[in-house]
Amino acid sequence: MRFAIATLGCKVNHYDSAIIQDRLGALGLERREFDEVADVYVINTCTVTDRADAESLKLARRARRLNPGARVLMTGCLAQANPAVLAAAPQVDRVIGLARLDDLERAALGEEGERVLVSNLRKQKAEIALGPASLAGQTRAFLKLQEGCDQFCSFCVIPFSRGSSRSVAPRRVMAALDELHQRGFKEVILTGVHLGGYGKDLSPPATLEDLLEMIAERCPIGRVRLSSIDPEELSGRIIEIVAQSDKFCPHFHLPLQAGEDQILSAMRRRYNADFYQRLIERILEAIPDAAIGTDLIVGFPGESQQQFERYVKFVEKLPLAYFHVFPYAVRTGTTAAKFGGRVSPAEITRRAQVMRQLGERKRVDFVRRFRGTRLKVLLEEPASADSLKGYSRNYIRVLVEAPVRLKNHEVEVEALATDGAALVAKLVWPAA
Ligand code: SF4
């Protein structure tokens, strides 16, 4: 039996898809590309914007066209948050919410069951499916330590779709890291929906700090990267652990979301602009070469033209390495969906463009700083017949002239020049 899987949305969804893929593979199903004929199509949906909702339905129609007799199964955030919209589509056979992997497996094997199977994840603390997962074509592995969120930022649908915060016990995390090491991974990215919420739900409670210390001491993998963490949850101790350990990559992703205190407060974020600025100055004092990235929402309800201009100026002066820009999109059920002062779609698009242009400039400026320096790069994939590309520890894309046998090895390089937002480097160690 053949299956194909399509994934929309963020890294967490991709991680979930990798787990689904592993589990269906273990049942003997053969994986196909999504544009090939298969017997089962799994669509791991996203509901971050209305566009993502529409895309999920479009994929269901595509699957049905590819094989009118296939089983079309919808899972992921949209399936969890709004199963009715998917169940109403004639192309869809089953809608199976998050944390119901056993049901998804049974549906894939053709067992009959209810058309819609969705649990209330805010009431039921479903265990996180933990499995070392690699995304297709990547040599870096992702490990999800935490799922769900209790924060309820006013613009965000995640606490509704992914349920309350729950964490993987440190013992299971360490075992998963050992397994990833045995499978040959040279880098692992510790991820979660709300990583800063790690451990509070465990009994006895654990802290992210204690877990990271354990990882610094005992993890057999040489490169460990933290994914996004909310600014107020990045403690001084975490900065210290990253600064002092040669395992942790000097890379922080700290979502700022807005540059004005009034907007941050309307978003229900728990820091102000000044706190954010001081935090990143503190990180760079401890780790001068660290890459600090962020997420920025533009066009949040009530964001005036003057506020947007101040927002751009604020971001411009921050020593950021890169950022992702998100045009504000209304999500039904969130507090912000009820806010007045909506910015017009055309203006939101314009603001996103202005911010993205600034982002490009900042990215190039950050990369330029490292011309002429030595960096450690994990080579991930061929860039040409005689070169490979990969990422430095501080998250710069680097192209290196190197033999293909060095793929999935960390090498030392000297950066010679920039190529847009990447570095071009020569191999220093090992010899070619
Ligand atoms: S902390 Fe992150 S996941 Fe949680 S509600 Fe806020 S934006 Fe959403």
Image (cartoon, rainbow, N blue to C red):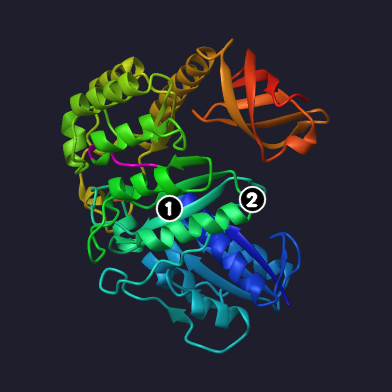
Q: Residue 60, how many percent across, how many down?
A: 59, 66
Q: Between residues 117 and 421, which one lies in front from this camera angle?
A: 421
- At label 2, the amino acid type is Gly
Tell me, yes or no, whether the highlighted magenta stretch contains residue 382.
Answer: no
Q: Between residues 176 and 324, which one lies in front from this camera angle?
A: 176
Among the 4 quarters of the image, the one containing residue 310: top left
Q: Residue at x 41, y 34 (%)?
A: 245
Q: Is mark 1 within 8 Å of ligand 1?
A: no
Among the 4 quarters of the image, the one containing residue 233: top left
Quick check: 343 above or below 428? below
Q: Residue 366, how many percent across, how many down?
A: 48, 17
Of helix, strand and loop, which mostly describes the magenta segment? Answer: loop
Q: Between residues 96 and 392, which one lies in front from this camera angle?
A: 392
Identify residue for label 2: 184
Q: Identify the disc placed on residue 50.
A: 1
Determine whether the residue tagged by mark 2 lies in a helix, strand or loop.
Answer: loop
Q: Residue 289, how many percent across, how many down?
A: 43, 20
Q: Which residues are magenta?
A: 228-232
Q: Quadrant of the N terminus?
A: bottom right
- At label 1, the amino acid type is Asp
